[in-house]
Image (tube, rainbow, N blue to C red):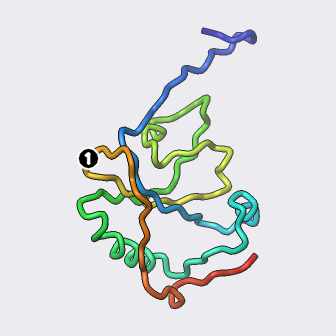
Amino acid sequence: LVDVFGEPKPKHHRLTMETNYYVWCASFGLKLRLFDDFDADSVFVIHDTGEFSRRLIQAIRNPLHGWRLTPCAVHYFDPYHPSKETRNVFACKHFKYLYQEEFRYVFLPPAPTAKLEPLSLTLGPLSDIAEVIDR
């Protein structure tokens, strides 16, 4: 198939997950545009990412026992020229969001799950490793 300019038409593919999952998202960088994107009035800046990760994983260990943890940097893709990385549904995002420099912790259930309840975690005080900065 070709379009009116003789260019090949892109093939349409659809990938879906057979389960819901939990995800915690962050950015590697601080871009002022993110405040508007997420209608935010403050930002949580993590100074010790290793310790924060340890505390997050510890806090989620009991409520999500048996779940698979997948930390991942988001892969940004061109929808007209997707790569093999786009098969990882929970770690992909349209390349128009490239500036977000997103990192995710994805928590996948041991068996497909259609509905998940909200999950609240307690990590304890974080002032030794992070701070909240108002816009």
Question: Residue reaching furthest bottom?
Answer: 128
44 or 111: nearer the viewer: 111
In this view, 130 is above or below 90 = below
Q: Position of residue 41 (x, y in %)?
A: 73, 72
Q: Is residue 3 left or right of residue 59?
A: right
Seen from the viewer's position, the closer of residues 75 and 65 is 65
Residue 88 screen position, x and y as percent: 43, 43
Q: Which quadrant of the figure has residue 78? A: top right
**Residue type at tag 1:** Ala
Q: Position of residue 10 (x, y in %)?
A: 59, 21
Return the x and y of residue 84 as percentages of the image width and height. Answer: 45, 36
State how many labels appear: 1
At a point 61% along the width and 42% down the height, the residue shown is: 94
Q: As drawn, is 79 to the left or to the right of 53?
A: right
**Residue pictured at 64% horizontal, 67% vertical:** 29
Location of mark 1 (residue): 111
Q: Secondary structure at mark 1?
A: loop
Crowd around label 1: few <14 · some 14–19 · many ≥20 (10 Å):
few
